[in-house]
Image (cartoon, helix red, strand yellow):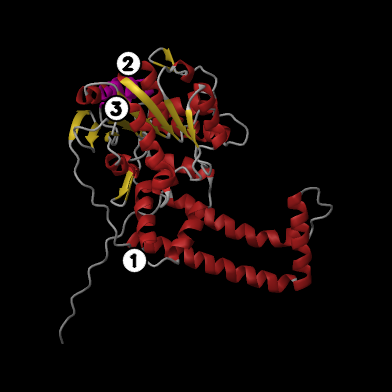
Amino acid sequence: MSRSTPRARPDRRLAPRPLPAHLAGAAMLWLTSRAALPVLRTVSRPSSVLGRQLRDLAVEIDALGIEPVERAVAVKIAHCAERYLAGLEAYRRHRFRRHSVSRPIVWQKGTTRLLDYGRATAPTVLVVPSLINRYYVLDLLPERSFLQHLVDSGLRPLVIDWRAPGSQERHFDLTDYIVGRLETALATARQIANGPIGVVGYCMGGLLALALALRCQREVACLALLATPWDFHVEGTQSQRLAVAADRLARGCNPVGNLSVEAIQTLFYVLDPFIAVRKFIRFAHLDPDSDEARSFVALEDWINDGVPLPIRVAHSCARSWYRDNEPGRGLWRVGGQFVRPQALRRPALVVIPGRDRIVPPVSAEPLAAAFGKATLLRPPLGHVGMMAATRAPDVLWTPIANWLQARLGGR
């Protein structure tokens, strides 16, 4: 009897980080859903909209009978759990793998690189992404690339690729990154351009880009800040909770170590503990060969491919930004110099996505106000949707490229 050749096991990517927290959040959601049924029947004298809704729901449950409702809830929970796990497994086994095109490295120091995306004759723009994420959210797919859109619009983007901290960077604080790395990268970019250049910062990168532009105004022609937080204590944000969580995580690390990707992702989990439940249940129903599934996997791969943060940077972000709100109070300093937007003597563009949950509009609004005469864009997009949404090129990328072209003297 012939022995069949065993089939090779498909390559399985890592599960979303932090997986234990995501699974625990799902379990908590479903267990509390069942446990809440008896409590609903005790609601009386509602004094709010939510209270009245709970009362109405309790009336409906009484009309149907508690036992049929409990059975229906149990069936629904079982179905959601099955779909959630199916979505996770479908993601891990999906065939998509990102194939990035090698870009020229025009400057490098330690683990920080400057990549050239454009044409030599085009106006130059230095693009600064967040320290905790890979830069390629700006170049997610061939058909969905903010950087390529800038190239096609007649610009030459030079993008910072931070990569994971090495032996040099493990002692770094924010000043080391801004003064020691970004200023040198800016000098290289200016030399390549043979004149002042545009600077674009995204999220945390926007704060770094602002500090850089203020310190090097002669080298900067204009500044665009995308979804950049500024006032960390405005009403309606979760800054205080994040500050406590980040500070405790940072204190638990070696003084010269890094805050791990898992720890950083835990902070984002705090913002929305049930996001994984929603998105993987939805993914379970997608055709794996569809463009939508491919885009989902590309974005999820990027989310899980984070960058550790040097512990001194983590402490600065947790304490200076989230706990003490130094940027919003005008007290944040880099290399002894205050970072105050009103001191910028160059054109500024501030992009505030209307559906941003990571940097709520109320946190970014004071930054636009501090500039005084900044151009303001309010796209109906989310924080990541700025770079991943299908309509982002028309709604946002083209206006950004046009604004940069107008101030850099492009075509």
Real-space CA distance between mark 1 and mark 3, rounded to the nearest whole angstrom: 41 Å
| Depth order, front residue of 190/9 | 190
Q: Which residue is mark 3?
A: 169
SS assignment for the magenta stretch, majority = helix
Real-space CA distance between mark 3 and mark 2, rounded to the nearest whole angstrom: 28 Å
For residue 129, side relative to residue 65 (left or right):
left
Real-space CA distance between mark 1 and mark 2, rounded to the nearest whole angstrom: 50 Å
- Specify which label sits upstream in the sequence, 1 or 3: 3
| Depth order, front residue of 371/115 | 371
Range of magenta residues: 168-186
Residue 177, x across and y down, in percent: 33, 24
Q: Residue at x 45, y 28 (%)?
A: 317
Q: Which residue is mark 2?
A: 218
| Depth order, front residue of 392/388 | 392
State which mark lies toward you, 1 or 2.
2
* Amino acid type, label 2: Arg
Q: How many marks?
A: 3
Q: Residue at x 78, y 71 (%)?
A: 63
Element type where label 3 sits in the image:
helix
State which mark lies toward you, 3 or 2.
2
> Which of the image's four quarters has the N terminus?
bottom left
- Outermost residue toward the right in this view: 45
For residue 215, side relative to residue 267 (left or right):
left
Residue 155, x across and y down, in percent: 28, 35
State which mark lies toward you, 1 or 3.
1
Q: Residue at x 50, y 17 (%)?
A: 331
> Which of the image's four quarters has the C terminus?
top left
* Amino acid type, label 1: Asp
Q: Which residue is mark 1?
A: 289
Element type where label 2 sits in the image:
helix
- Specify which label sits upstream in the sequence, 1 or 2: 2
